[in-house]
Amino acid sequence: MQAQNESLNPQSVDGVFRALADPTRRHVLERLSRSPASVSELAKPFDMALPSLLQHLKILEGSGLVRSGKNGRVRTYQLVPKRMQQAEDWLGKVFSSEVESTSR
């Protein structure tokens, strides 16, 4: 059953939670919260091969948490705050329902 409000549909936020489950991806999101960054800028703090970081970025982009654009040869990533807000809304709904049911 598809919920009318996608932000409250658990299936619509599964990808967000999967993306957030990895510490490397969380670190990338923290970095992008300051400003958009190129792949090379995002790769600097990590001791991993570039294809590995690109896989993390692909997962983040697939979850809708980031988007990328290409200007010449440089690919830049930036946050998509609306997607995180949808996950926060879903969590708020779940936990507010739980609080209501336990306070009866």
Image (spheres, rainbow, N blue to C red):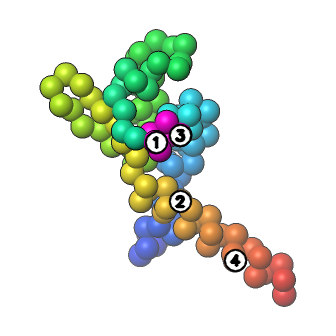
Q: Is the C-beta separation of discs 1 and 2 under 8 Å?
A: no
Up/down of 90 relative to 13, above or below: below
> For the point 24% across and 37% down, which residue is it?
69
Kind of element beneath mark 3: helix
* Residue range (magenta): 29-34
Q: Is the C-beta separation of discs 1 and 4 under 8 Å?
A: no
- Image location of residue 96, percent across then percent down: 69, 75
Name the residue beneath numbered marker 3. Answer: 30
Kind of element beneath mark 1: loop
- Image location of residue 27, percent across then percent down: 56, 34
Residue type at mark 1: give it: Arg
- Image location of residue 104, percent across then percent down: 84, 87
Q: Is the C-beta separation of discs 3 and 1 under 8 Å?
A: yes
Q: Can you name the residue that lies furthest to the bottom here?
A: 104
Name the residue beneath numbered marker 2. Answer: 87
Res 55 label: none
Residue type at mark 4: give it: Ser
Name the residue beneath numbered marker 1. Answer: 34
Q: Of discs 4 and 3, which sits in the foreground?
A: 3
Label 3 crowd bin: few (<14), some (14–19), many (20+), radius 10 Å: few
Q: How many marks?
A: 4
Label 2 crowd bin: few (<14), some (14–19), many (20+), radius 10 Å: many
Residue type at mark 2: give it: Ala
In this rendering, position of residue 88 left or right of residue 104? left
Kind of element beneath mark 2: helix
